[in-house]
Amino acid sequence: MANVVVIGTQWGDEGKGKVVDLLSAHAHRVVRFQGGNNAGHTIVVSGERFVLHLIPSGILYPDTRCLIGNGVVVDPEVLLEEIKGLLDRGVSIDPKKLGLSERAHLIMPYHKAIDMAREKAKGKSKIGTTGRGIGPCYEDKVARVGIRAVDLTEPDILRQKIKANLKEKNFYLTNFFGCEPLEYEPMVDTYLSLSRELSPFIVDVSTELDEAVRSNENILFEGAQGTHLDIDHGTYPFVTSSNPVAANACVGAGIGPKGLDSIVGIVKAYTTRVGSGPFVSELTEGTGKYLRERGQEFGATTGRPRRCGWLDLVVVRYSARINGITHLAVTKLDVLTGLDPINLCVAYKYRGKRLENVPTKLSELNGCSPIYEQMDGWKEDISGARAFEELPKKTQAYIRRIEDFVGVPASIISAGSGREETIVCKNPFDG
Ligand code: IMP
């Protein structure tokens, strides 16, 4: 029995949803541990497309229990909509299938209002957030004024907290941004009514996981976003407000660090980024546009076109170090079919100097250009390959170069959006 963490090695949108869905077949429980509905995890089963924002991607398996950990910030309205949307499509969800940590912080209307007002005020220097109130919600958590899921079960406390927070938030919204104030009564009514629907799902996730570990269950931890959007290790300040790295699976779900066995790093076969911030191997024309169209690189949450470029191995190797990755899962390999040659970014050039690592200074990173290694492309359709040996030799060489550079074997290779369009060289649950 093993515990497996799945994280993104780039800037999110690496295809974690598909890999988590695939690995969920071996898991008793699937746990989200950070982020919120800024995430959009796409899963395709028998040609049917599901996009999940908050509910873990294991939900499509009838016997897998899904948990939302304390590290996630939850917009209760979005969570209920997502539950209803899945129920409408015949996916069974009840408190036996889904649990929400009592310690998870709630996104409130003022978080969304502040997120949007700030971005607007920043103009050209905006972060390009998803506008879902993620950052302001994490700020309140750290400022110790956050409202947690458990507060939904105590209406008086909920009322008091909303009242106290709203006084300060309205002052900020009206005086600093010139926005309209938010009203107290309708907000309380909405959250009280949401609480009636959500209360049955609220549980102690940490204790549940402890019991699951003792019962030798397989647990899968599902990361959101990616390592280079990490608040500590990403391209600050163009990052999200949580830690998408593997170590946060412990903090964000409530288990000890010894409880993690395998760390799967998802690597898209090329690179994408949504929102602002440095991106050394970005291609704004030609191949960049081709990758966007071919890979359908449009945000699953906001619909924004994603910026595209060649695979940056400097970025991926950095992630292997920060996360302690034990397995790579290379996704969307089929999108590269037909491109020849293919470039791999293996170092950066800054003011004539070769850099082997991602610099911390934003000014330096912005001034870097990519140093490429060229590889032969392939023309064959690879979506039908079910074993590594069935891939064309040139595709095999591309994968081997990634493994070699990053120093981690590719255990999973995905060449299509369907569950079956996958090669599993090694199951991370087997160690
Ligand atoms: P926030 O998380 O909405 O605050 O946005 C901060 C940055 O993270 C922006 O550049 C977003 O585009 C990016 N971001 C947040 N969530 C995701 C995701 O799931 N995939 C890709 N980028 C994301």
Image: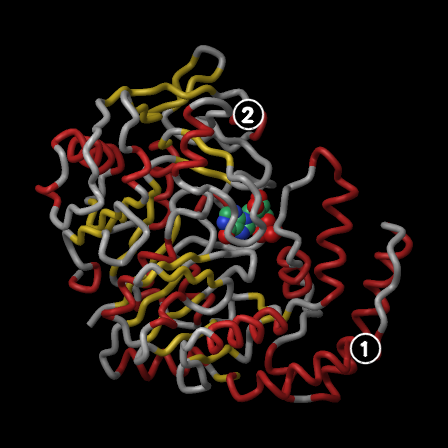
Label placed on residue 104: none
Residue 304 is drawn in which quadrant? Answer: top right
Residue that lies at the very extreme toward the left in this rendered image: 389
Question: On the image, numbered disc 1 is attached to which residue?
Answer: 186
Q: Amino acid at mark 1?
A: Pro
Q: Is residue 68 above or below residue 405?
A: below
Question: On the image, numbered disc 2 is attached to which residue?
Answer: 366
Cβ at disc 2 under 8 Å from ligand 1: no
Q: Residue at x 47, y 73 (%)?
A: 86
Q: Position of residue 333 (x, y in %)?
A: 28, 40
Q: Is residue 107 above or below residue 326?
A: below
Q: Residue at x 50, y 44 (%)?
A: 298
In the figure, is residue 338 to the left or right of 389? right
- Secondary structure beneath disc 2? helix
Q: Position of residue 203 (x, y in %)?
A: 49, 84
Q: Position of residue 329 (x, y in %)?
A: 27, 48
Q: Is residue 269 at all visible to an observer of this figure? A: yes
| Image color mode | secondary structure
Q: Quadrant of the N terminus?
A: bottom left
Mark 2 vs mark 1, foreground winner is: 1
- Which residue occupies the foreground of this view, 338 or 182? 338
In the rendered structure, which disc, 2 or 1, sits on the residue that comes first in sequence? 1
Q: Residue at x 48, y 44 (%)?
A: 233
Alpha-carbon span between mark 2 and mark 1: 45 Å
Q: Residue at x 66, y 53 (%)?
A: 131
Q: Quadrant of the C terminus?
A: bottom left
Mark 2 in CB contact with mark 1 (< 8 angstroms)? no
